[in-house]
Amino acid sequence: METYLGIDLGGTKLLIGELDNNGNILKYKKYTSGFFSQQSALAVIKESLDNYIQTVGWTENIPVAMGVGLIGRVDPDNGIWLQIDPARTQPIPLAKELSDIYDIPCRIDNDVKSATRAERYFGFGQISKNFIYINAGTGIAAGFVVNGRQIRGSHFNAGEVGHTQVGVNVGIQCGCGRIDCVEKIASSIGFDACARLLKDRYETQLSISDNPEDRVSVKDIFTLYEKDDPLCVHLVENASQALANLIMNLVRVSDPDTVVLGGGLVSDGFLHTKIIEKLNQTTIRFVKNGVVITKLNPVFIGLLGAGAVAMNV
Ligand SMILES: [Zn+2]
């Protein structure tokens, strides 16, 4: 049996797994990655993969290829990891380095673009050639599939829709230089930033740590929303309106028949219900398959994506 090795490197965790060509995850193991530069990420991947090979091992033979999903900008054609963010720019030929070390052909791609590949190959892509995959988790980004092809752009930077304004005004500064980017309102980073900015204006039971590294719990915000906590009601209303506006704006850009939502923030369905209530029916009239949550397991969509990168689909 031919298998593929997937490596999903997120902001804090690393997931390694072996998949068959139908996207079934045969084995996997989770590692923590910590904060990293591109060079130190290579060491983290190597250390974890060595451990994986020793403790989990291959199902039968050595995988025919490996794929890595990475945060930041990636040139998948040349296997170069260009940048994590503007403050962490240290291009490295990661695909070549890994394939040299392990003697397995290696391909790499950005994490949300990898997840979009998984959606295209294993998910809604089976019934749609024109869909948008929106990932709302730690941040917000999207993958556009148009006529069956994924949009990449001139610098592999297409889909960074988290840094657009969507008509929800909080007055919050984004690291990109703009004010009220949707990512600063409707992602885990956004809930945290808005809670800190607005905590003195609305009563709340929400626990907000003095340590800025210690992010507020979005799960707690959802729970307190149900108890009519004034701050949490405001945060949830803002975030769901921001995501609904983002979706409606993007629908006007690429005319999809399906909008797929994924990522830790939407996977439990709570925000999804609130987003759907806020969509204008005229705007989304051609989205015939709906604005839906991915059917792929949100915990593993990054790993599936890395598998799809390995398969080069
Ligand atoms: Zn921004």
Image (cartoon, grey):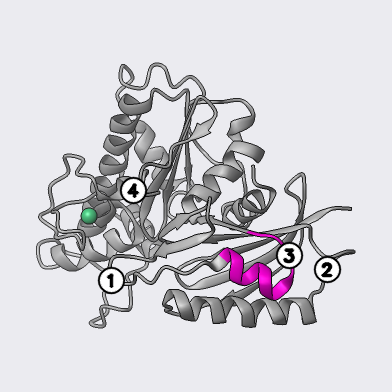
- Among numbered discs 2 and 4, the one appearing first in the sequence: 2
- Among numbered discs 1 and 4, the one appearing first in the sequence: 1
**Tag 2–tag 4 contact (CB < 8 Å):** no
Which of the pair 237/159 is nearer the observer?
Answer: 159
In the drawing, what numbered circle is on residue 160? 4
Query: Which of the two discs, 1 and 4, sits closer to the camera?
Result: 1
- Report, in whole angstroms, how far the alpha carbon at label 2 lies from the one at label 4: 36 Å
Say which residue appears at 52% left-offset and 32% top-offset: 149
Query: Which of the two discs, 1 and 2, sits closer to the camera?
Result: 1
Query: Which of the two discs, 3 and 4, sits closer to the camera?
Result: 3
* Local secondary structure at mark 1: loop
Say which residue appears at 62% left-offset and 45% top-offset: 296
Which of the pair 165/187 is nearer the observer?
Answer: 165
Which of the pair 239/183 is nearer the observer?
Answer: 183
Q: Is residue 96 magenta?
A: yes
Query: Which of the two discs, 1 and 3, sits closer to the camera?
Result: 3
The residues colored magenta run 95-106
